[in-house]
Image (spheres, helix red, strand yellow):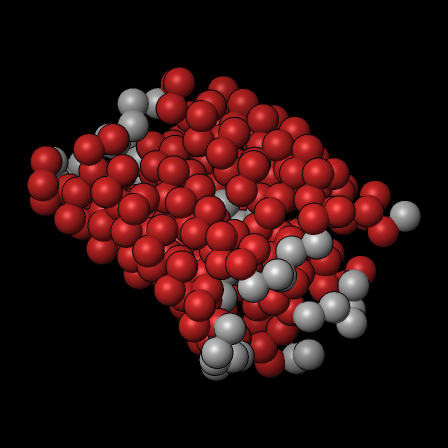
Amino acid sequence: MEWIIVSLASLLAGFVDAIVGGGGLILLPALFATFASAPPATLLGTNKSASVWGTAMATWQYSRRVQMPWRAMLPAAAAGFVGSFFGAWVVTLVSPDFLRKLLPLVMVTVLAYTLAKKDLGMHHQPRWSGRAEALAACAIGVVIGFYDGFFGPGTGSFLVFAFVRLLGYDFLNASASAKLLNLATNLSALILFTAKGHIWWHFTVPLAVANVLGSVLGTYMALRHGTGFVRAIFILVVSVLILKTGYDAFLR
């Protein structure tokens, strides 16, 4: 029964994550609620072992339909890989609890800015090209990559917002690019969690299959309905993130 519950959560997580990130908002709480006595690092590692497959599928689907800025995003993915590995290593030494109260406040700022700027992310107008775009993307990759390895919730949403606000992408192109970086950060953290023995491999296959199925459907919906749909889901996911992280930080 336990694997059915977490597999259904993984399915929904893959769907949401493929559109705009935030899949960890669904799967991680399900894992923590179902296995309350398990070590947190093990549940984080098991989450990564499933989500990496859905993210890989979403990246492949987006790359077939959206023109990816590979010259900027491949170095950024490498920077995200390094940042995430270092963040995952640090979390084995230092507790990330201090971020719990800060995160909902940051998410409120992101939501308020997105709502105030009605045309934010509706038009694809990259601010830079060539080396400047690659350097900016690498800076985003290493900072948010570290956050993903160290703490994690909302990583995909932070990537999407950074690409929209800082690089001038629309929400669809930002989501597509975010998937590539999120794949790199997930792989990096997964390698470290594997080396530390923090993965339940017997849960990985059903969770991964469910996550991929959700990812296929989510990517299809994003590509079919375009930027306006992705923006709306972004606002919804960030709003839920604020409620969830705010409850965890101040009320639990």
* Residue 149 visible (yes or no): yes
Above or below 127: residue 39: below
| Image quadrant where residue 40 sits | bottom right
* Residue 107 visible (yes or no): no
Give the residue displayed 38% in from the left and 38% down from the top. 180
Placement of the C terminus among the 4 image quadrants = bottom right
Give the residue displayed 15% in from the left and 48% down from the top. 135
Asked if residue 207 lies left or right of residue 182, the reply is: right
Q: Position of residue 80 (x, y in %)?
A: 33, 52
Asked if residue 241 lies left or right of residue 106, the reply is: right
| Image quadrant where residue 231 sits | top left
Asked if residue 149 lies left or right of residue 142, the reply is: right
Asked if residue 116 lies left or right of residue 60, the reply is: left
| Image quadrant where residue 175 sits | top left
Q: Position of residue 225 (x, y in %)?
A: 48, 24
Q: Nearer the viewer, residue 196 or 82?
A: 196
Give the residue displayed 78% in from the left and 69% down from the top. 36
Q: Nearer the viewer, residue 233 or 36?
A: 36
